[in-house]
Structure formats: structure tokens, C-alpha cells
Image: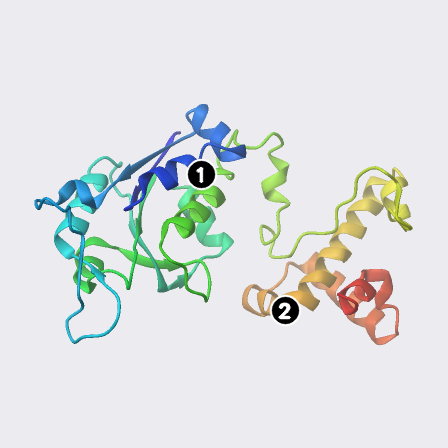
Amino acid sequence: MTRYIEVVTLFPDMVRSALAFGIVGRALERGLAVVGTEDPRAHTSDAHRTVDDRPYGGGPGMVLKPEPMLAAIRAAHARLPAGSPRICLSAQGVRLDQRRVEALAALPGFLLIAGRYEGLDERVVALGADEELSIGDYVLSGGELPALAVIDAVVRLLPGALGDERSSAEDSFAQGLLDWPHYTRPETFEGLAVPAVLLSGDHAEVERWRLRQSVARTWMRRPDWIVRHGLAPRTSRALNEFLAARQAGEGEAWGERHEQNR
């Protein structure tokens, strides 16, 4: 099933050009997803195509006007399948995570609203958005880069987007854990060798090593993820093994030396 995505943006060329490369570009070429853009400037009536104005109450910067923004949102949303949510990209939004990405990938379509300047007139959010979404606790110049991040994260989950469908299933966060370390040739590089288990040919032992590494990395780098989402029984056992090894001073076997020296 093709997924349909629309982006309301003042810089449609920025969005279209960035989507021409890599996994997303190939997925779009194959028709796995279709991404359209709508420029609010096309919905202005003055000679200067004005889309912003000074904020009521004073203060620096400019605010995007409700008339062209809502007209653009409604025009773009009309092209999408029924049930497609309208998502405003905003620092005030709920933090994007892999579970939300998976939910978006299951939808037939969705609309992304990219703001600029000091932001949108609040009435645009009230009348033209179903939810607000943030990609992190920092401020960017506009919503185009967050929109591209959302599109990339969603499109790579679509069936046929990746060369090996196992890749997305083994990504960081996909199983509630960070990814394990990856190695390729040469076997030794600048004095650092590939872990012997990866050369052993013992697939069961390789799988166990990868789980141990993922558990250790997640606990040391993102323990909040474990607290929020919990662990499957097998993963919980691996975590208990790691904590016991750490208490016994054997954390290096789990990659802890690398973490402490970062």
C-alpha cells in the first residue's frame, strides 16, 4: 500500500531536493510513498505574497498568518486519504519516538506542518492540526528539517524500502534497546580487532553477544528507555547478567571500558 505524505512549507524545494537521495529516494521512485508539498504563499492575495506579520503584544520576530497557513493545510489535506492526521512540528509537541514512527508508518497518509520565524498563529494549531510533534528539546530555524526526519524514519519502515527487511527490526529502539556494535573488514584496524565471537561462525553465540551488547549500551547510555518501556523476559535476564558482571568488575566484557573512555 502506498503511503501519502503532504508537507505544508514555505520552502518546498528544500523538502523535495532532500528526499531525492538514499533509501527514501529509492522508495519514492518505486512508488512505496508519495510526498507532496503545499506552499502557503500560493494562498496569498497581495503582490508581496505576505505570509507573516508582527506579533500582537509586541516582541521580536514575525508570526505566520492564519489565512494562508490554514488554506495551505486544507488544500494539502484534501489530497490525502481519509483519516490522515494533521501534524504540526513544534518544540511544544510530544517527543517523537520509534513507537510513534511505527504508528505513522501504518497509516495510509499524514500531513506535516512546517513553521518558520517565531512560529504559527495559535489559531492555525487550533483549527488546522490534530497533534503537535517535536523531534527533540532544541530550536531549529523551521519545521522542514523535522519534517524530513519524520519522513525518513517512516519511509524506511515501509515494506520493500530496505534491501533486507531485518534491518529495520534490528535498529536501535525497534526492540526497546540501542543497537549493538557493528564491524566489517579488515579484521584488525589500527590495533583494534573485531571481537572473536563475530568470527566464530556460532550464530547462537553471536546472537547472545549482540543482545548483551545492546543491553549494556542501553543501560549505560539510555537507562530512561528501560525505565519507560520495560524489557522482555529474555532481555531482562541479560540485563541482570550485565549488572552482576558489572558489580564483579567484569563490565569490560560488555563494552563498559569503551563507554567509560568516550
Q: Which residue is mark 2?
A: 223
Q: Judge left or right: residue 227 versus residue 8.
A: right
* Residue at the outermost top position: 30
Foreground of the two, 250 or 43: 43
Which label belongs to residue 182?
none
Q: Residue at x 29, y 38 (%)?
A: 37
Give the residue type that dot 2 points to: Pro
Foreground of the two, 149 or 231: 149
Give x and y (percent) for residue 181: 75, 51
Number of other residues with Cα within 10 Å of mark 2, as a class: few under 14, some 14 to 19, many 20 or more: some
Q: Residue at x 88, y 73 (%)?
A: 249
Disc 2 element? helix
Q: Residue at x 79, y 67 (%)?
A: 261
Residue 206 sits in quarter: top right
Q: Which residue is mark 1?
A: 18
Q: How many marks?
A: 2
Give x and y (percent) for residue 214: 71, 56
Structural distance between the alpha carbons of marks 2 and 1: 33 Å
Disc 1 element? helix
Position of 79 relative to 206 (above/below): above
Give the residue type that dot 1 points to: Ala
**Is residue 108 in sight in this rendering?**
no
